[in-house]
Amino acid sequence: MKRLGIALAVAALAFGVNMSAQHFDNTRFGITAGVTSSSSKIKNVDTKSISLFHAGVALEAPLGGGFAIQPEILYQVKGLSLDKWGDSTGNQIAEGFQTKVGFVEVPVQIQWGPDLVAFRPYGFVEPFIGYQISSNGKGEAKSLSKELQKMEYGLSLGAGLDISHIQLSAKYFWNFGSVYQSDVAKTGSTIGGILDGNNFNGFAISAAFFF
């Protein structure tokens, strides 16, 4: 009986290890959400990061050799903030400037990481595109919200960890292009100088649950 008990325990352990090892070999669907912190580097202006959010769905599909692909569809909110803006002579131009922009965003993670049975650490590169569906501005940004670029595109680099049905990840992203459309410079607006800066850049932390 003692030998039978040991044999059953070993068989149960082997079965559990096998099931765990196979876990990361299957295509999985999940939900994801997290915090997005972004800002924009603008010439001669000190901007502050603003912490917003993202949420959506994800599909993780293994490709073999430690590689996997994970496309997502997110509602992603990015923005920038500054307390005040002065000109080269020190005169204050604007105060309480803030922009929040909501995108339907489609990032595609290309992951690589070893399956360590109980968990899977990985790194990833992630191109993304998005389309603006909402905008909210304070101060002078409010009057120029209609001049925001509708399309966004960029690249992220990050790392993550799969633990059973839970996935944790962190990334830094770069949006390419300008926040506003080029014709803003022709309006004579006091914030036309924003065109000298970059689009929203920052980092995001996400948690996902896979079924």
Image (cartoon, rainbow, N blue to C red):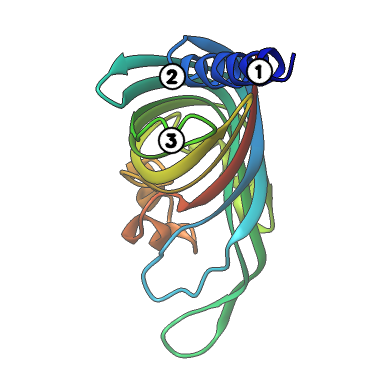
* Residues packed near mark 3 inside 10 Å, few (<14), some (14 to 19) or many (20 plus): some
C-alpha separation, residue under disc 3 versus residue under disc 2: 23 Å
Q: Report the residue marked by disc 2.
A: 71
Above or below, 145 relative to 166: below
C-alpha separation, residue under disc 2 versus residue under disc 1: 49 Å
Which of disc 3 and disc 1 is earlier in sequence?
1
Q: Nearer the viewer, residue 204 or 160?
A: 160
- x and y, in percent, of residue 133 in the image: 59, 24
Residue 54 occupies quadrant: top right
Label 3 secondary element: loop
* Residues packed near mark 1 inside 10 Å, few (<14), some (14 to 19) or many (20 plus): few
Q: Nearer the viewer, residue 52 or 4?
A: 4
- Quadrant of the snapshot with the C terminus: top right
C-alpha separation, residue under disc 1 versus residue under disc 3: 71 Å
Q: Report the residue marked by disc 1.
A: 3
Q: Report the residue marked by disc 3.
A: 149
Name the residue at 41% across, 85% down: 88
Residue 8 occupies quadrant: top right
Name the residue at 45% across, 26% down: 130
- x and y, in percent, of residue 76 in the image: 58, 33
Front disc: 3 or 2: 2
CB atoms of marks 3 and 2 within 8 Å: no
Please, what is the three-letter code of the amino acid marked with disc 1?
A: Arg
